[in-house]
Amino acid sequence: MNGSAAPTIDQVASATRDALESMNRPAPQPVINATGVVIHTNLGRAPLSRAASEAAILAAQGYSNLEFDLGSGRRGSRQAHLQNILQELTGAEAALVVNNNASAVLLGLSALAAGKEVIVSRGEAVEIGGGFRVPDVLSQSGAILVDVGTTNRTYARDYEDAITQNTGAFLKAHASNFRVEGFTAAVEPGELVELGARKDVPVLHDVGSGSLLLTENYGLAHEPTPQESVAAGVGLTFFSGDKLLGGPQAGIVVGTRDLVNRLERHPLARAFRIDKMSLASLIATLVHYLRGEAEREIPIWRMISTPVQLLEERAISWQKAVQEIPGVHARVDDSRSAIGGGSLPGETLPTRVLSLDCSTVAGGAQQVMERLRKADPPVIARIEDDRVLLDPRTVSTRSDEELLQALTNSFK
């Protein structure tokens, strides 16, 4: 007891109503992402294409041949539905898909290196968010971490000097959410493959973001691709489905047939298997790449490739609309959109944003942000120099009316 007065009947009724409304709301709740962060982990990472969304709904609404071979009338494999597609897109001999990339890496290490040593560059024994640390994953798999080199420089001879009779694999992990610059040296996958071939050690490569398109074509730094890893001869390559691939949450493994088969036979493969809705959605996403339409159909690539001129036109149209709201002082400013999602650290794209002066609102920019979050649907923006910024790069044109209504209500 803190000695405060008991709530009134009206207060109890109001609190009850709010609790019931909260329970009846869809969850997770759809929001408008006006932050400019394309792959926003806290907001669900990559939004799906229309085809991918429809595929997931079809898979959810009825029965399917998920694990049934229509030709033979016998049990089939859910993996068979995307084997040919991933082979075609990456050049790999075989492929396996699980529920996320952390699971994929753990499965690979468990199947190939339990009880054995796995050699990793000290600069790649990293944490990539959410407490996912490479050393911890190695430990959970039963493998023994052997880190070599230094934080900023590792050479092929460091790996070779660490090889013993108990070496199970080389693991290379792409530093997807940070960047080390200056006096650095790293071993390329091809060098590790050559060393592994001589010493009979398989190479595992976690490329992280899973970009199948060349990011440098969009004014960004180069992001390692699964195709490059496969072409270099890497035994197993791991990547995410919901980052730069632009699909649902999934962990994708491509590589040599004998190594992939070992993962398929491991007990964890069933524990980590992908569900039918994510599988259908992933296949639809991959088909966009096969058809050469990824930039047009996959939302994150449509955002990344949007010309600055079009972004400026939308920001100006927003500015004209909010000028009618009493007390609103808005302008269009230059800014930068981040890629996010543990992809392309430090890389941004030029954009134009609606910049709001919130000095006339009690509580300033923070109060406006709070009001926007309480809108229906909530609007998530960002603050710079005590101004609220809204970036059209990550806002669907279908959401413009709802965004402008939220702004109107926030300045009342």
Image (tube, rainbow, N blue to C red):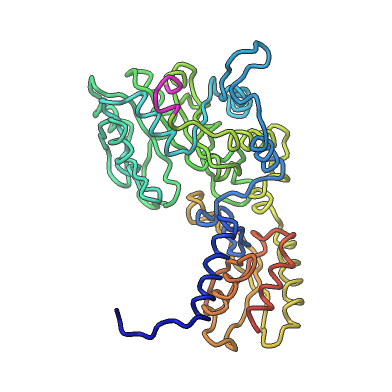
Viewer-proximal residue among 362 and 36: 362
Residue at the image position 35 percent from the left and 42 percent from the top: 124
Residue for point 66% across, 27% down = 64
- Residue 7 lies in quadrant: bottom left
Residue 262 to residue 328: above or below: above
State the residue lying farthest toward the top: 72
Residue situated in front as seen by the camera: 327 or 329: 327
Q: Pinpoint residue 270: horizontal percent, then vertical percent.
A: 45, 27
Q: Is residue 28 left or right of residue 131?
A: right
Q: Quadrant of residue 137?
A: top left
- Lateral position of residue 110 relative to residue 208, left or right: left
Residue at the image point whose x is 68% and y is 13% from the top: 71
Above or below, 299 against 75 in this view is below
To which quarter of the image does residue 145 belong?
top left
Vertical comparison of 178 with 158: above or below: below
Rendered residue at 50%/56% (across/down):
42
Q: Nearer the viewer, residue 197 or 412?
A: 412
Q: Residue 301 in the image: x percent, y percent?
A: 65, 48
Q: Position of residue 317 (x, y in %)?
A: 76, 71
Say which quadrant the N terminus sits in. bottom left
Q: Is residue 144 above or below residue 184?
A: above
On whether residue 247 falls in the magenta region, the answer is no
Instruction: Please report the bounds of the magenta region as a residue range.
Output: 263-270
In what quadrant of the picture does the C terminus appear?
A: bottom right
Measuring from the top left, give residue 169's x and y in whole percent: 33, 26
- Does residue 111 appear to the left or right of 383 in the view shown? left
- Our reading of the magenta stretch's main secondary structure is helix
Tell which of 211 and 362 is nearer to you: 362
